[in-house]
Amino acid sequence: MARSKFFNLIESATLERQVEDVYNKGLEIYFPKSPITYPFACDGYLEHTTESGKEIKLLVEYKFDKNLENGIDRAKVILQSIFYLKHFEKNGCVLPNVVLIGDKNECFVLHTNTLIKYLDYDIDWTIAPSNAGDTYLDLCIEISKDDDIVNTYIYDIDENFSFKNVADKVYEYAENVKRYVHITEENIVHIFDTFCKKVLAKGTELSPNDLVGLFIGLITDNVNYYIHPNKKNTLISPYGEVKVKNAGYMSFINHFSRNYTPIEKRKFTEISDRLIEDTNRRNKGEFYTPKLFVDYAHKMIEQYLGADWKERFVVWDNCCGTKNLTKDYNFAELYCSTLEKAELEMSAKYNANAYSFQFDFLNDSLDNIPMGLKNALEQNKPIVFLINPPYATACNQGETSKEGINATMVRNAMVEQGLGGGAENLQHQFMYRIAEIKNKYNLTNVVFALFSKPIYLSGQKSPTSYLNVGGKPYYMAVTFTDNTTKNLGVIKGSDGKDGIDGIGIDDLTIDEEGYLQASAGGMIDYETLEKGIGLIRNS
């Protein structure tokens, strides 16, 4: 998403007048030919006729660096606006029907129907509106507890802010037509951040997977997610009771749509891995696999095993996440396991014929795997381990400590076998356990297909010495980094065949060191991938 032009303009504001200038430019765009006036010395007022013939009478109040998320601070500004409404009333003018309150950091919109009741209060209406908040603090407290006001959605002025959304809310109130903000692939990351910040109560403890599952469920399921009838700060959900900020929750569900098509819901589930990545990936080393890479991996496997490999082999993805590696394909005998229950719930609609189960591959006993999978191993059926394992170590160079991430039963076994260096990496642990399974069941037809960082298959700590699992091991090694460019190079499998160690995006060029370089962003197609591989093989 492009950086907000509104935010670019207001970010450097140091005075209320500068804040006002930025908002007024936005008003001029979305309410054209509607001059801003200043009756009763208010910060601004405009009248505009909508296409449906409805009249917008908008009162605006600007502040500089107030905390509009704070109930009392917000109420003080609202009371100032109410005082201006009283001036309209006393002078026999038609009252504004919408109020916009804008600050450098936040803004919100109110229908004046929620404020009119306060015009009948017996207070001194002759004082300056700017002094009303400090003069009538008890009234501010009352306003701060008014549900009609508390549930108002507060817009954060940040890189993702769009003044159009604010203008749409003004039109909505004036036309008395309820409009919800539609969640899309483009805005879901920002809205997820809003959910975490404004809906969840402080101290709420959920794993990243459960947190994303809760969010996806809330925006797509109107039945199983609701506020407890007797505890307004408790959300009932399939993940149990979750503590929330009631006002934040109400403003959230009153602002964002919760009705989506099956295709849109599928997209949300696909994006859930990206949300998990944003929440905890840097620490836990989990990776989501874009569909294009998955499709290309399947294409490469066919080159080794034949087009019918999904029918001939048992397939086990033992760190399946939300099934990105398998959900678009049919398998004769597929097993999908993951550590997180929430991932199984989010991906329940995919691979309906598969046996999906919660299983800690690095700690749990093989006695806990499904009977069908155990029988397949005992009967020495051909098997493909198709995985995109986590890559984290206890502390990667240049990163903060991840102590405890790699403390598993498999790591202990590797250390006992003198493989202490390789044991620090989770991917190596997955590979070691697969080798253990091969040896335990005397398997003779094992294929290992994984996405991997190339260093783990070619460096000093390469696990190839203990991965002599027979058959034709297949390595599809994809590197994701935070850099603006990614390298596409060659790595040899144990059978000597070339594979991919990283996929670049967009333009592909050979750099001075012989690597294929690509700028980040955009999509990549099969033709580009083939071109990249060809360049490497010919160089």
Image (cartoon, rainbow, N blue to C red):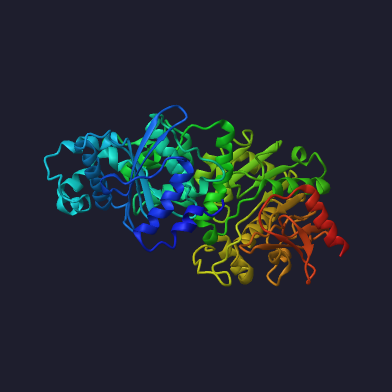
| Residue 330 shows up from this direction | yes
Residue placed most toward the observer, 450 or 526? 526
Q: Position of residue 174 (x, y in %)?
A: 38, 32
Residue placed most toward the observer, 124 or 268? 124
Residue placed most toward the observer, 1 or 467? 1
Left/right placement of residue 221 relative to residue 523 reads left
Q: Position of residue 424 (x, y in %)?
A: 59, 67
Left/right placement of residue 3 relative to residue 249 reads right
**Residue 14 picture quarter:** bottom left
**Residue 483 picture quarter:** bottom right
Q: Is residue 510 above or below residue 261?
A: below
Q: Position of residue 108 (x, y in %)?
A: 36, 45
Q: Is residue 278 above or below residue 98?
A: below
Instruction: Pick out the residue farthest to the top.
Output: 52
Image quadrant occupied by the C terminus? bottom right
**Residue drawn at the location 47% of the way across and 38% of the way down:** 181
Instruction: Pick out the residue farthest to the right.
Output: 538
Q: Is residue 314 above or below residue 391?
A: above
**Residue drawn at the location 42% of the way across and 40% of the way down:** 34
| Residue 232 shows up from this direction | no
Q: Position of residue 197 (x, y in %)?
A: 40, 51
Left/right placement of residue 167 relative to residue 433 reads left
Q: How many marks?
A: 0
